[in-house]
Image (cartoon, coloured by chain):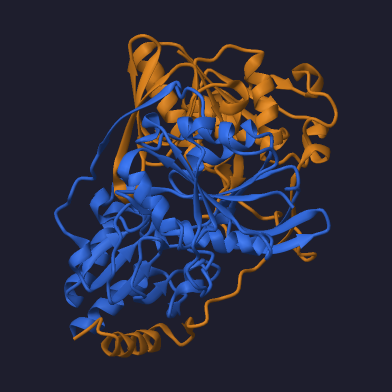
Amino acid sequence: MEILVCAKRVPDTSENEIQLDARGNDIERDDLVYSINEPDNYAVEEALQIVAKVGGSVTVVTVGGEDDEEILRREMAMGAKHGVLIADEAFSGSDGKGIATILKAYIQKNHFDLILTGVQAEDGAAQVGGMVAALLAYPFASLVNSIEVLDGRKLKISREIAGGNREMNEIDLPCVLSIQTGINEPRYVGMRGIRQVQSVEIPTFGASELGLGPGTVGEAAAKVKRVNYFVPAAGKGAEILKGSREANIDKLVELLKAKGGLQ
Amino acid sequence: MPRIFAYVEHQGGVPDECAVELAAAGKKIDPAALPTAVVTGWGRDLDAVCQTLRAFYTEVWKIANEALAYPNAELVRKALVDALPPYSIVLIPHAHFGTDLGPGLSIKLNSTFVPDVVAIEGIEGPYLRVVRQEFGGQLSAHFRCDIFSGAVINIRPGAFKPGDSAPLDGTIIDKSAEVGVLAAGRRYLDTIAAESGDVDIKKYPVLVSVGRGIQEKDNVAIAEELAEAMGAAVSCSRPVVDAKWLPKSRQVGSSGQTVKPKVYMACGISGSFQHLAGLKGSPFIVAINKNPKAPIFQVADVGIVDDILEFLPELTEKVKA
């Protein structure tokens, strides 16, 4: 099975405090730690496990710039056979539909049986996978937390739904699935593995190779535009204890007793 | 102004509680609008839902089709594309079903998709101005959206409070005949219920809940010691289950358990909206997190900026003393 995983390099929110920059319309990016979007890493692991069972190969693609090659190499060190970078000045300012349109153009120039994305990225939009599927007229399922390959070009999948229940579906290939975290345990990647793929050439495609004319993607085509970032207001009742650790513990124990948390 | 529709989910003949929130969100887009509810399904359950919705919507569009007895988003999408007029604005809750339906629906309607909206500031020239959250809720952002040739807008559950208004006496309009044959490359099989675990966290009035900040499996014992001293149970957020440090039955959130404790100790939990959706009944929330920007501090009653791996053992000693 030929599997494509669409991945994105994002600021790692577990490693960073995200701060506004001085002008307030972007985040302070200078000292950020970036990594692969966590759900995308689960998607790559799932693709590798499927290929280990039924054969085929895994390609990881990202839409971005030169800096994004690092996540492609990381996923190649995990076992992905190919990394592909899609980069062009004309792509900057794309909204979700723009990114989906770019990925659709790449997918149509190749042959993939299965396309995976992570369930969402740092913007929490959860939109590109469903859009790519609709643009290609492929079936789609979101929040997928198990995949079993059946005979006859079909998969049996489960979707995570409310309350931890699982919705079982059968889905025809080719299809697009968005992968939920926790579906597997992604393998560890060491520095050595990354060094081994350091010199592998990563093919790069731009607007002309993909046949994307001006105005179809990028800022000109974007219908959804971010104006600025701002810090959300703190809740009304939030009281931050600012004493020493010992004083905070004393105060907390007092509060817990008053609120029924301690006898 | 394009016509505004609210897609209402339902189960067992009862509309989802977001039904009134979508009506409130529609009013934020256009105070003069009378949003229309759209409901898909089959049989008596569908009829019961439509009847209930008459109190909240002046028009309720009913789409009855045996293929829609279970809400398979791929089939619902086809039904909506057949039934909705051009340039519609469609509001959908941003949850398990909405992320399945919304993005693809926007493509098929050739309209704009606006995901996970937490506030609507209104029309500004030719645009709708909305607020979204990014970076797990650490920052908010204003967006300008071109919705005048139609849009699918996914609305964050719980973000829009319905106003006090007298019950309406809406009309049910049957649109079933406008929907063609429904078939899709994805077929619903069945639903597997979540496994019950060793400890029922719903039964405890006090929960010591751990998140990514617990850092490794062996550290869960630190929370267990505090919970034991407090007569509480240990619950957790999603990353702890993903890492297999605690079983799924301990997870609080929209994809886990819904709990109603008196006191909730959020330890090293960032506070995503999916996590907070599992917390009902206005508990007293204590947040302990070393990141002062963690969104959990926006909803907590008391916050402490500290490392839980050092703070919790000292708290346990104090509680035991």
Write down which chain is painted blue.
B
Q: Position of residue A51 (x, y in %)?
A: 41, 17
Q: Quadrant of the C terminus of chain A?
A: bottom left
Whether residue A32 is situated above or below residue B231 in the rendered picture: above
Quarter of the image with the N terminus of chain A in it: top left
Q: Which chain is orange?
A: A
Residue A53 placement (x, y as % from top left)? 34, 15
What percent of the width, then of the height, locates residue B170?
A: 50, 58
The one nearer the camera, B215 or B108, is B108
Displayed quadrant of residue B139 = bottom right
Q: Residue at x 53, y 25 (%)?
A: A76
**Residue drawn where x is 31% and y is 44% of the image:** B44
Tell me, yes or no, if residue A19 can be seen here. Answer: no
Residue A71's place in the image compared with A54, above or below, is: below
Residue B283 % position (x, y): 34, 76
Q: Quadrant of residue B219 in the image?
A: bottom left
